[in-house]
Structure formats: C-alpha cells, structure tokens
Image (cartoon, rainbow, N blue to C red):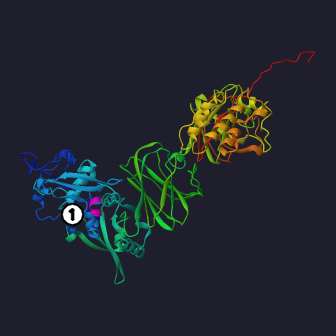
Amino acid sequence: ASPILRSCSRGRPPSRRPSGGMSITGSALWEDPAFPASDTSVGLTDSPPASWRRFHALFPDAVLPPDIPPGDVRQGALGSCWLLAPVAALASRHPKLLASLFVDTSRMAQGRVTLQTWGGAGWQHLEIDTLLPCDQDGNALFSHGWAALVEKAAAKRCGSFAGLEGGRSVEAFVDLTGGFAKRYSLGEYDDAAATTRITHWISQGALLCASASGREETHTVAVTAAGRRAGQHFVTIRDTASDGALGMTELATAHFLHTFDRLSVGWLAEERQRQVRHQVEMDGLPGGPPMTSTWCTNHQHLIRSPQRCRVHLLLSQSSHAEYLGLSVLSAASVQPVVDCTTEQLLAEAGPERARQLVCEFVAEAGCRYLVVPHSVRARASGIFILRVLSEAPVSMQTLPPINHVDVNGGWEAHTAGGRFPSDRWGSNPQFAVCAPAGGQVRCVLSALNGKDAIGEAAVADARVGLRVLRASESGGEPCGEDQGSSDEGCTGGGASLLLLSGLAGGPATATHPRALGSDYCRQLERQHRSTLDAEAAKTAALAIQDLTTRAGPPRHERPAPPTSRYQKALVAIARARRALRSPPRMTVAEAGFVSASEGTVLFEAAAGEALLLVPSTQMAGQHGAFRLQLYSSTPLTVRRLADGHHALVRGAWTATSA
C-alpha cells in the first residue's frame, strides 16, 4: 500500500485516563452546555479523552485569523481528512475567505469563539467553547492549531466528534465556502490529460481534493498544483496527516493516478463573472421522479437568459434524508408541463443522496428553460433550497402549481362494461373534459382497492385502462346513438357532476347542474376572476343553467351564444353526451391495461374541445372502485355524465312464436 494511504489509517492510539479520572483544565471559563466536555461529545468508545484543555494552553503560539499559516492544518487521531483537506486547500488558495469563518474571536479570553458554516440557505453561526479533548500526555487528541476549532464546530454540527469519522469532501467544500462542488473520476484521464485538467481548474480559482476509495486504505489530500517539468508531469499535494513540513509532496502524475481515483472540485459561489442570481425556498418536493405520473406536481421554475451563458443549479437539503434530482427542460411556453419527454429534456442530475445536488447547462440567448427539482420519494417533506448561479443575469419565475382534479367512481353491476370493443363498453362510467385554453392533460386511473375488489371472475386479467375520444363529430352530432333532446342527454336524471379546477392549481369544486344559478355565478366569478369579468360570468352561468335543466325557457328566449373562450368551453362540456361506441376517427388515445392498480394516458386537448374519458377494466363484469386524477397546465373543467339507461327484457320462443 502507498505510504500516503497508510498515513490516514495508521490507527488511533489508545487514550488511557489518569487513575483519578478525566480532568478539565480551565473550567473557570465559559463551557458550552449544548456541547459539553464529556465522552458523549466525543462519541468514540475505543479512544475516550483523558482530559480537556483550553485552546491557548495547548497552542500558545497559534495565530487566529486573519493570519492563517497553512501548516497549522494537521490531522490527529480522527478520520476527518475529508474535512481538513478542503480546509488546507482553502487556507492556501483563499486565506481571507477562511478567516471570515471566524466570526467573533474577541471573547477568546472568556473561553468562547463563534464560527460560521454554510447551512444551505445562508450562513449559520456556531458558538463553541475552547475546550479540546486530550490524550494522557495532555496533547490534543484530534486536530492541531486553529484547525482544531474548525473541527470542533463541525463536530458540534454533527452531534459528536465521532460524526466526523468519514465523510465527503464535496460537502466540506460547500460548508466552508457556501459554493458548490462536484466529484470526478480520475480513471478516464491519462497523465497529460489529468495534468492539463487540474491546471485548468486551479487557474479558474477552484479548490481540489483527491481521494482514494474502494481499497482497504482510504484517504483524502488537498491538490495545490500541477504541471510539467523536464518532460515529466507532476501533481503537488498537501497531506494533512503527514508529519513533514506543511505536508507538501510532489508526485509524478502516473503515481498520483495510481494512488487516487476521485477528484473533488469546489467553486466559490461568487467569483469573477459568476454570481448568485436567485434563491428559492420550497416546502417539500411532492411529485416524485420523472418516471412517475405525479412528477408534474413538483415545483416548476421558468428561467430565461437574454444572452448565452452557463448556468449552475444548486438543490440543497439540511440532511441526507432524500435522494435528490434535477431536470432541465426546454420550455415552449410559460405554462407548467405535465410530462418529461426525452425531446424536451436538456440536462439532468441525480438521483443522489446528498446535501447538495449540482446541475449545469448552457442557456442560449432568449430561450426559456423549465427547472423541476424532485426527489425519488413522492411527498418528500422538509425545506429544500434552489439556487441559480450564472455568468450573466437571468430571470426566474416560479410557475403556479399544476391544475389538478380528483374524481372518485366505481364499476358496478350495470356499469362494468369492459374494454372496447366489448358490446357493453358504452355502459362504463364516462366523464366529459374540457380545457378552455387547451394544452396537455395527463389522466391517471387508480384502482382503489387492488386486485381482490376488481371482481370474482378472471382476477388475473382484471387490468384497468382508459380510452379518450372526442365528444362529438365536427358537425356537432354525438359520437354515440341519439339520446333524445340535449337537455335530457345532458342531465340523465340529474346525476351529472361539474368539476372545476382552479386557475392557480387549487382544489376542484363540485356542483350539481340543477343547483347552477346565482350561487354558481358567484363561485365562477370568484374562482376565475382573472379570466372572466362579472358580466361574462353571468352569461356563462345562464348558458349552463339553460342547457342543464329540464324546464328551461323557450329556445327563442334563450340568451345569446357566449363569446369568451371559457364560456364556450362550459357550453361545450354541458352539451357532451355519453358515447355508445368509439369509432377510430373519434378516438384520441388509449393507455393502460397493463396493471391491475394503475393506468395512465397523456393526450393533447384542443382549446374549447370537449373530450370523453372512459375508464374500464379488461373484461366486462369486473367490479371495483377507482379514482381519476387529471393534471393539466391550464384550467380544466370535468363533468361526470349520468349513467346510461339500462333495460333487461326477457322472452321465450314458443311453438307458435318460433
């Protein structure tokens, strides 16, 4: 094994306490009650501290910021190289930034000091005392010099020093700088390419750490330089676990690549032209990953750049609780989308279980991009932070939530018609849907009570699915058989239901057609004030009331045809009739019949066009309850049509009638 790797795994020397027990030197000064000088704060059963001593008693010559000697970063008997290597890189490249971590050192004489670390949404202050754990000889057990205070602040944040045993240098970069970091594999580089790449990153102001993994020994070192001398490529590292002067070692690039297999690169949040342009706090990630039907319910943000530039997206969480992901799509409009297609997908990152996820892409001048953060688990709770960093100013707009309508229903004895082209298909539950402004609609059919409740016969074939068809011919004739007058066909005995999705994605509301009138006018005006004025709302309500009641005024006294787009949509959906068949020319889409629990269909709704949704099981006669969930980028109107009329006639052929 390499001596460099052995330096981090040389073993923690046992700490034997004096016979009199653990002592605390300098106990007259302030002691942190939230992180006391005790075995609990250390958390290492194999190496408990023999005593606790004050910082200045251990390091009387130590110089606190702003003058930070790089050689002060030296690792002790704790596997915290993943933290101290980035500290060493920061001390050598950006000493002023590292000095700013020490917010308040004016009370060192009282035994307290305040440091700051990045918390995802901003800098967080951590106040600690200056007591440090020591071995039986009175020497610092862990890190040395001013780095011991940085290490103790990180231990307090983790809950104990044991929490620093092993970690990710990319997260240490973020905590120390408030910027972002990415990890690269060194296996794809040869000597010349690795040297060129490292030199380029260093010239750009990046901080670098190399680590070895997948071996018995694991260690992380800071990378400070790279180049070529006398025809040989070399890399200079700083090893915080080395006892040499400043831990500086120059390695041949070939030996460096043989020893280390990963490179962590950290960037400051604001450096040169790159700046933090926007920051958004999100309460939860509700929708899940792109392959799920509810992905569209995640928060969606629209980004536009006036000029070509590189954009970095940073998605943060306070812990490692969730697997995070980011999707960047090219946006054709300013509306949220209901589907993540390969053609639209421009860039993505994750899923990764990390405190910060980074995704970068190049934004073209004048183009729109949709950013959708998500987690692998739907309905992920917690606070998530999205930051946008870019080389040029970009605009960002958080889009309103997706429009969502839920409908519950079921297949019963006379409404379980089976899949088309079953003769009984027209008896299935049917729903009229209309999007006044048009757009994509995703409909998810879910069986609420699983396979056992779908029916007794042919349970293995009880798959569920959806069929979407136009509600009428272009000439206005219904796609089913004639069902009488428009009034009768619309109400079907008064059992139809009207559902409206809010413009801002609020919950849908249900109204029986017979109750339409002034109350509905007020409701319509309140929910859709941005679309309709009061007079237009009254006109639409009168039109709907006229079409959905048996005893309407004479035809010649009815109000003039509605003129607004939304009024026309309401009239179209009110006139929709049940379909008894589904001709190919009228069929829009069909999906599902693969699973007994869910079927999903995605279709494009033309503005103001009424469509019929027909959920069904694979075979006729299979009963069960279901739920329809509709997602749309624009407001939706959904009306449940009355069940079709059913008649059963029995007869017989006799000797005289056969």
10 Å neighbourhood of mark 1: few (<14), some, or many (≥20)? many
Q: Quick check: 509 left or right of 383?
A: right
Look at the picture and state if 32 lies above or below 191: above
Which residue appears at 54% of the width and 37% of the height? 507
Q: Secondary structure at mark 1?
A: loop
* Residue 162 visible within the image: no
Residue 284 placement: quadrant: top left
Amino acid marked by disc 1: Arg
Residue 482 placement: quadrant: top right
Q: Which of 10/418 is in front?
A: 418
Write down the residue under mark 1: 74
Q: Which residues are magenta?
A: 82-88
Q: Magenta stretch containing residue 85, yes or no?
A: yes
Q: Magenta stretch containing residue 23, yes or no?
A: no
Residue 255's spot in the image, x, y percent? 34, 72
Q: Which of 77/35 is in front?
A: 35
Q: Quick check: 599 left or right of 162?
A: right
Residue 2's spot in the image, x, y percent? 29, 66
